[in-house]
Image (cartoon, rainbow, N blue to C red):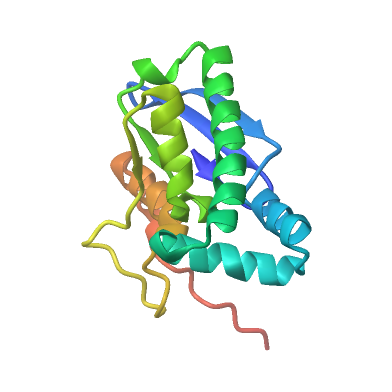
């Protein structure tokens, strides 16, 4: 489950093959809007508040927790509904893996566990893979690593090398 800012994408794999793909037009930016409207602050301030909340949920104000939990619960219900429509109820899944910026909010995992009784975890970067560019070794780039690892497993190696720069004369 990729919880982005604008959308949430649910991909179900069965025996290593994509079995279902659904996109829900709801993402973690809705939490920014809820906080902005509910607390009377700018969207930028709301996003900063959400990021601080994700980093330290234990010290968050009750009002902030209420907005985040309510919207996370709504998005989790939609995720579970899409799984049901795809005929893959959460209880039958081996695991649910959360990625994307919204996955930093533990409320999504908590809501999926509570509502769907599913085994949920947040994706982490493999320890043996590093980016040459500082600051890129984080779960936000897990999709890049997953695609490269899938290509490697299929024996497609030419995507693992940077192309030579084109020099114009």
Taking the image as shown, residue 137 lies to the left or right of residue 112, namely left
Q: Position of residue 25 (x, y in %)?
A: 71, 37
Q: Name the residue furthest bottom.
A: 169
Q: Total label count?
A: 0
Is residue 143 in view? Answer: no
Question: At x 71% / y 70%, what residue is drawn?
Answer: 44
> Where is residue 61 shown, x and y percent of the image?
52, 62
**Residue 67 seen in this snapshot:** yes
Q: Residue furthest left?
A: 128
Specify whether 87 is left or right of 36. left
Instruction: Judge by depth and name the residue closer to the eye, 126 or 103.
Output: 103
Q: Is residue 41 above or below residue 114?
A: below
Q: Where is residue 24 shown, x and y percent of the image?
A: 66, 33
Which corner quadrant holds the C terminus?
Answer: bottom right
Q: Quick check: 1 above or below 143?
A: above
State the residue lying farthest toward the top: 87
Q: Residue 129 location, x and y as percent?
A: 27, 63
Q: Nearer the viewer, residue 105 or 21?
A: 105
Please tell me whether residue 63 is drawn above or below residue 16 in the rendered image: below
The residue at the point 58 percent across, 57 percent down is: 64
């Amino acid at each position: 489950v990729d919880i982005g800012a604008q959308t949430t994408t649910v991909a179900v794999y069965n025996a290593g093959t994509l079995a279902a793909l659904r996109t829900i037009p709801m993402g973690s930016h809705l939490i920014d809007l809820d906080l902005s409207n509910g607390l009377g602050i700018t969207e930028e301030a709301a996003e900063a508040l959400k990021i601080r909340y994700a980093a330290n949920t234990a010290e968050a104000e009750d009002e902030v927790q209420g907005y985040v939990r309510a919207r996370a619960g709504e998005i989790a219900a939609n995720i579970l509904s899409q799984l049901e429509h795809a005929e893959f109820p959460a209880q039958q899944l081996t695991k649910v893996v959360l990625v994307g910026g919204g996955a930093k909010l533990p409320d999504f995992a908590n809501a999926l566990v509570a509502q769907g009784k599913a085994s949920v975890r947040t994706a982490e970067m493999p320890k043996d893979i590093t980016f040459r560019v500082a600051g890129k070794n984080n779960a936000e780039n897990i999709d890049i690593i997953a695609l490269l690892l899938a290509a490697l497993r299929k024996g497609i190696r030419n995507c693992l090398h940077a192309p030579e720069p084109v020099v114009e004369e």
